[in-house]
Image (spheres, rainbow, N blue to C red):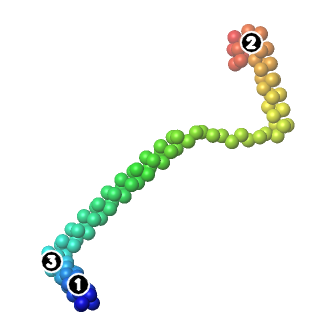
Amino acid sequence: MAKNGSFLLGAIVGGIAGAAATLFLSSERGKQLLQEFTETNIKRWQQHEKENVSHDIEKQKEQEEQKPFSSIPIPLPSSDVEQLLKETKEAVNDVEKRLNKGIDAHGEN
């Protein structure tokens, strides 16, 4: 009995699916309904994707704003450090000499 019931249910479902396919594919109104259905689903999908992309962009901006700025120190060779210190000391001495003479750092009175 279960086999007969399953066959009958399959035949009914298959008949309904076939009738729907025939309606949508053969009649002008069916083609129109199918096109409207497809366009509506495409519009829904596009809107959904726009919202997802907007949400993802906002989330990424928030994450970037929350990231602390970090820098990676670049070690200089000791000779470069010594040269920079020497140049800095010379510049400070030069400014002190100019100030002591009453001349500002730009060489003006």
Which is nearer the eye, 69 or 85?
69
Q: Label 2 vs label 1: CA separation?
A: 104 Å
Residue type at the position of mark 1: Leu
Residue type at the position of mark 3: Glu
Foreground: disc 2 or disc 1: 1
Residue labelled with disc 1: 9
Going 77% across and 40% down the picture, which residue do you hit?
A: 75
Residue type at the position of mark 2: Leu
The answer to whether 85 appears left or right of 9 in the picture is right
Mark 3 element type? helix
Which is nearer the eye, 103 or 80?
80
Q: Label 1 vs label 3: CA separation?
A: 30 Å
Residue 67 appears in the figure: yes
Residues marked 1 and 3 touching at CB (< 8 Å) = no
Number of labels in the image equals 3
Foreground: disc 1 or disc 3: 1
Residue labelled with disc 3: 28
